[in-house]
Amino acid sequence: MHKRARVKATQQAELLQLLMPALTESELDLVRRARNLKATGFRKVDQTSYRHATAFEALLGYLYLTDLTRLKEILQITAEPQN
Protein backbone atom coordinates (compact mmCIF):
# COMPACT_ATOMS: atom_id res chain seq x y z
CA MET A 1 0.00 0.00 0.00
CA HIS A 2 2.78 2.45 0.85
CA LYS A 3 4.63 1.84 -2.42
CA ARG A 4 1.51 2.65 -4.42
CA ALA A 5 0.69 5.81 -2.42
CA ARG A 6 -2.47 4.14 -1.14
CA VAL A 7 -2.00 5.64 2.30
CA LYS A 8 -2.80 9.16 1.10
CA ALA A 9 -6.31 10.41 1.74
CA THR A 10 -6.66 11.78 -1.78
CA GLN A 11 -5.64 8.46 -3.34
CA GLN A 12 -8.00 6.52 -1.07
CA ALA A 13 -10.84 8.87 -2.01
CA GLU A 14 -10.13 8.21 -5.69
CA LEU A 15 -10.06 4.46 -5.10
CA LEU A 16 -13.42 4.64 -3.37
CA GLN A 17 -14.89 6.40 -6.41
CA LEU A 18 -13.45 3.65 -8.60
CA LEU A 19 -15.05 0.99 -6.41
CA MET A 20 -18.51 2.53 -6.08
CA PRO A 21 -20.06 0.74 -9.11
CA ALA A 22 -18.78 -2.64 -7.87
CA LEU A 23 -20.11 -2.36 -4.31
CA THR A 24 -23.15 -4.19 -3.02
CA GLU A 25 -26.06 -2.35 -1.39
CA SER A 26 -24.87 -3.25 2.11
CA GLU A 27 -21.33 -2.10 1.28
CA LEU A 28 -22.67 1.15 -0.15
CA ASP A 29 -24.67 1.68 3.03
CA LEU A 30 -21.57 1.13 5.15
CA VAL A 31 -19.57 3.57 2.99
CA ARG A 32 -22.37 6.13 3.21
CA ARG A 33 -22.50 5.89 7.01
CA ALA A 34 -18.71 6.02 7.42
CA ARG A 35 -18.44 8.97 5.04
CA ASN A 36 -20.98 10.93 7.04
CA LEU A 37 -19.20 10.54 10.36
CA LYS A 38 -17.84 13.76 11.74
CA ALA A 39 -14.33 14.14 10.38
CA THR A 40 -11.62 15.55 12.60
CA GLY A 41 -7.94 16.02 12.03
CA PHE A 42 -7.98 16.74 8.29
CA ARG A 43 -5.22 19.31 8.00
CA LYS A 44 -3.47 18.60 4.73
CA VAL A 45 -6.45 17.58 2.64
CA ASP A 46 -9.94 18.88 2.04
CA GLN A 47 -12.75 17.55 4.21
CA THR A 48 -14.51 15.72 1.36
CA SER A 49 -11.41 13.71 0.44
CA TYR A 50 -10.77 12.98 4.11
CA ARG A 51 -14.30 11.65 4.61
CA HIS A 52 -14.12 9.50 1.48
CA ALA A 53 -10.76 8.12 2.61
CA THR A 54 -12.27 7.30 6.00
CA ALA A 55 -15.14 5.49 4.26
CA PHE A 56 -12.65 3.52 2.13
CA GLU A 57 -10.74 2.45 5.24
CA ALA A 58 -13.98 1.53 7.03
CA LEU A 59 -14.99 -0.66 4.08
CA LEU A 60 -11.65 -2.47 4.07
CA GLY A 61 -11.80 -2.98 7.83
CA TYR A 62 -15.35 -4.27 7.70
CA LEU A 63 -14.52 -6.73 4.92
CA TYR A 64 -11.37 -7.85 6.74
CA LEU A 65 -13.50 -8.81 9.73
CA THR A 66 -16.45 -10.31 7.86
CA ASP A 67 -15.54 -11.51 4.35
CA LEU A 68 -11.92 -12.02 3.33
CA THR A 69 -12.90 -13.32 -0.10
CA ARG A 70 -14.79 -10.11 -0.87
CA LEU A 71 -11.89 -8.07 0.51
CA LYS A 72 -9.56 -9.77 -1.96
CA GLU A 73 -11.99 -8.96 -4.78
CA ILE A 74 -12.10 -5.31 -3.77
CA LEU A 75 -8.32 -5.08 -3.46
CA GLN A 76 -7.96 -6.70 -6.87
CA ILE A 77 -10.14 -4.00 -8.39
CA THR A 78 -7.99 -1.29 -6.81
CA ALA A 79 -4.82 -2.99 -8.06
CA GLU A 80 -5.89 -2.94 -11.70
CA PRO A 81 -4.33 -0.23 -13.86
CA GLN A 82 -6.60 2.79 -14.14
CA ASN A 83 -6.74 4.34 -17.62
Image (cartoon, grey):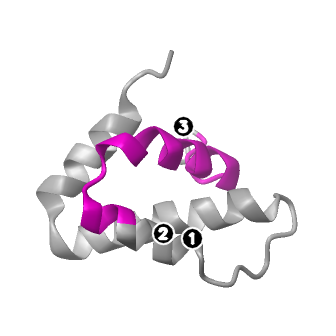
Residue drawn 73% across and 60% down? 48
Q: Would you say the magenta stretch is mainly helix, strand or loop? A: helix
Instruction: Read off the residue under disc 1.
Output: 35
Three-letter amino acid code at the position of disc 2: Arg
Secondary structure of the residue carrying tag 2 is: helix
Instruction: Read off the residue under disc 2.
Output: 32
Contact between labelled residues 2 and 1, with CB atoms less than 8 Å apart: yes
Residue drawn 37% across and 26% down? 80
Instruction: Read off the residue under disc 3.
Output: 4
Task: Quote the CA–CA distance across marks 1 and 2.
Answer: 5 Å
- Mark 1 or mark 3, which is nearer the start of the sequence? 3
Callout 3 crowding tier (Cα within 10 Å): few <14, some 14–19, many ≥20:
few
Three-letter amino acid code at the position of disc 1: Arg
Rendered position, 22 above or below 44:
above
Judged left or right of residue 35, residue 59 is left
Q: Quick check: is 17 in the magenta stretch?
A: yes
Task: Quote the CA–CA distance across marks 2 and 3.
Answer: 25 Å
Callout 2 crowding tier (Cα within 10 Å): few <14, some 14–19, many ≥20:
some
Contact between labelled residues 1 and 3, with CB atoms less than 8 Å apart: no
